Amino acid sequence: MPDELDVLERHPKTAKPGEVMRPHNLMCFGCGAESPHGLQLEMYAGEGFTVEAKMPVEQWMEGGPGVIHGGILSSALDDVMGMTPRLLGPPGVTVHLQVDFLQPIPVGKTLHLRAEILGRQRRKIYTEGVAHLGDPERPVARANGVFVTVDVREHFAEHVENSAKAAEYMGGKPQL
Ligand SMILES: CCCCC/C=C\C/C=C\C/C=C\C/C=C\CCCC(=O)SCCNC(=O)CCNC(=O)[C@H](O)C(C)(C)COP(=O)(O)OP(=O)(O)OC[C@H]1O[C@@H](n2cnc3c(N)ncnc32)[C@H](O)[C@@H]1OP(=O)(O)O
């Protein structure tokens, strides 16, 4: 993370602590409520510059026998960290993701996910994520992500026609 950081300020219209945050996109693999094969994470704004979510570790998420697949865990951490830019304003896309897998995560448990903004420099937002199984003192995974804010209309202009929600996004207002 660079030394010279901008001052962080919560956007006045972002979710208040304890409130649900709107999905990136209803079809988002991480947080989209209509994504048929997705994680369907419900995200909550926390205090300060944090976002939280809980994810039941289901059978279909298995990687090694009886434990979560690392890619699923990485996706969940990516998406929770990826929600944090919205606390400041425009959304960001992942440009860098790093995950440390600390303990096996059993199927049948509930994963507690928490992300926090560490700093911002221009469009770059530096974040960390942590996952635990109920005891915050015993993390099972840690992550860092860098997100770059984008103008969604511009950024997705060439691709939006591929979305299952194309008609909605191309016809109406973008869901910010
Ligand atoms: C048309 C209607 C659409 C309606 C849409 C409706 C709803 C959608 C709403 C919200 C959805 C928004 C976001 C979704 C969010 C999360 C989903 C989960 C997370 C993901 O699944 S997301 C997918 C994977 N993600 C990507 O698909 C990104 C691919 N990428 C790019 O698209 C470009 O890369 C881009 C645009 C990011 C930047 O490109 P650019 O040309 O605009 O800007 P540039 O290159 O100058 O970078 C600016 C500053 O970032 C620094 N920087 C760049 N890369 C770096 C790296 N790797 N590490 C460290 N710093 C990096 C530079 O060094 C510079 O820093 P500096 O300011 O200091 O110079």
Image (cartoon, rainbow, N blue to C red):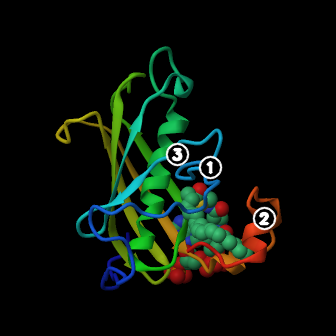
The first of marks 1 and 2 along the sequence is: 1
Looking at the image, which residue is at 49% across and 54% down?
Answer: 79
Q: Quadrant of ligand 1?
A: bottom right
For the point 19% across and 36% down, which residue is it? Answer: 135
Secondary structure at numbered mark 1: loop
Q: Which amino acid does label 2 sit on?
A: Ala
Residue 160 in percent (x, y) is at 77, 67
The amino acid beneath tag 1 is Glu
Residue occupying the point 81% across, 59% down: 162
Outermost residue on the top side: it is 65
The residue indicated by pointer 1 is 34
The residue carrying mark 3 is: 40
Q: In this view, does 137 lie to the left or right of 50?
A: left
Q: Is residue 174 above or below residue 159?
A: below
Query: What whole-number distance in Å separates the C-alpha atoms at marks 1 and 2?
Result: 14 Å
In-front residue for pair 102/20: 20
Disc 2 and disc 3: Cα gap in Å?
20 Å
Label 1: how many Cα within 10 Å (few below 14, some 14–19, many 20+): some
* Badge 2 element: helix
Camera-near label (3 vs 1) is 1
Q: Quadrant of the N terminus?
A: bottom left
- Quadrant location of residue 163? bottom right
Label 2 environment density (alpha carbons within 10 Å; few <14, some 14–19, many ≥20)? few
Residue 42 x %, y %: 43, 51
- Residue 166 - label: 2
Q: What residue type is labelled 3?
A: Gln
- Residue 141: tell me if it is visible: yes
Quadrant where the C terminus sits is: bottom right
- Which disc number belongs to residue 72? none
